[in-house]
Amino acid sequence: MEICILFGSLRNNSNTGLLLEPFINELKRFGIDINYIVLKDLDIEPCTACWTCQNIFEEPGCPKKDDMDLIYQAVLKSDCIIFASPIYSWYCTPPMKAVMDRLVYGMNKYYGDSEGPCLWEGKKCALITTCGYEVENGAGVFEEGLRRYAKHSKLQYIGKLAIQDIDGKEYFQNEFAVKAAKEFAQKVVNSLK
């Protein structure tokens, strides 16, 4: 089994990155292959709605020449995609949004001259996020967006791990956060069986 983690933080030593550490360690304990992609380190242009991809059914088909091809291939190989992003103004970071826009069109061939396939149908997806506000208020909008995104893309949304920043970086390494991350990893693994 392979999981693709799309990491959308813009900081190297971020809260979301700290929360991912025990999650990833637990996945490794179960023998899961992990493709961890740091989006801020890649050249990813935003989607411009040119629709070229919509009439290419056998692959994502985006004409942009950037690092998105790496992400398309990683997602196509994976059984589950983890969207890991801190919350900025009630939604994900700009690199994550650019990737999500490019994926939703490159993978879903719904808008061309004739309706085509969904290239990632049936894959699982989940959300890992950190936010400054109480979790439902801070992460709720992005989670609802991801639920709708998954439904539209014929993905199976399996849930979220969201932790509020209360005491700074140490909070994401305390017993509560580590336990929650490990339990969420177990939930993800169980969903893949």
Image (tube, helix red, strand yellow):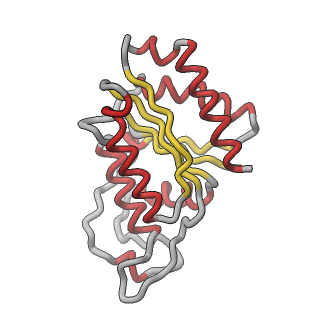
Residue 179 drawn at (x, y percent): 61, 21
Q: Quick one: 71 or 113, which is closer to the camera? A: 113
Q: Is residue 18 above or below residue 184?
A: above
Residue 18 drawn at (x, y percent): 49, 23
The residue lying at 42 percent from left, 61 percent from top is 103
Q: Is residue 127 above or below residue 43?
A: above
The residue lying at 44 percent from left, 71 percent from top is 108
Q: Is residue 71 above or below residue 116?
A: above
Q: Which residue occupies the extreme front position in the image?
A: 136
The residue lying at 65 percent from left, 39 percent from top is 187
Relative to residue 72, is residue 30 drawn left or right? right
Q: Quick one: 166 or 97, which is closer to the camera? A: 166
Relative to residue 112, is residue 35 drawn left or right? right
Q: Is residue 172 above or below residue 86?
A: above
Q: Quadrant of residue 47?
A: bottom left
Q: Quadrant of residue 36?
A: top right
Relative to residue 47, is residue 152 drawn left or right? right
